[in-house]
Image: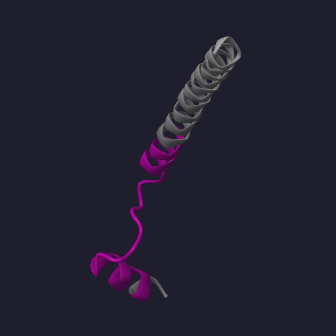
Amino acid sequence: MALGEEAWRASGMAAPTDVTELQARITHLEQHAVDLARSLDERQAELDAARATNRDLTRALNERG
């Protein structure tokens, strides 16, 4: 079994053995995903506000004309 695992690693197709590095990378990517989600939520709120303003202005123009 050990010989097979060694051959697998030597082939370059095995996963990296540095688990700590991978966990740090996962943590970094998870935080990045949270940051992106927060940014998306903020932009969506801004877009919703702009759309509401646009509707109000369009309604006001239609009522006036």
| Residue at 45%, 44% in the rendered image | 25
Which secondary structure is most common in the magenta stretch? helix
- Which residues make up the magenta segment? 4-27
Classify 56 as above or below 48. above
| Residue at 49%, 35% in the rendered image | 32
Classify 30 as above or below 44. below
Residue closer to the observer: 34 or 8: 34
Q: Position of residue 59 (x, y in %)?
A: 69, 19
Classify 40 as above or below 45. below
Residue closer to the observer: 8 or 64: 64
Q: Position of residue 50 (x, y in %)?
A: 58, 20
Q: Position of residue 57 (x, y in %)?
A: 62, 15
Queried whether the magenta region covers residue 5, the answer comes back as yes
Image mark count:
0
Quadrant of the frame with the C terminus = top right
Query: Does residue 41 appear left or right of residue 10 in this picture?
Result: right
| Residue at 39%, 87% in the rendered image | 3
Queried whether the magenta region covers residue 39, the answer comes back as no
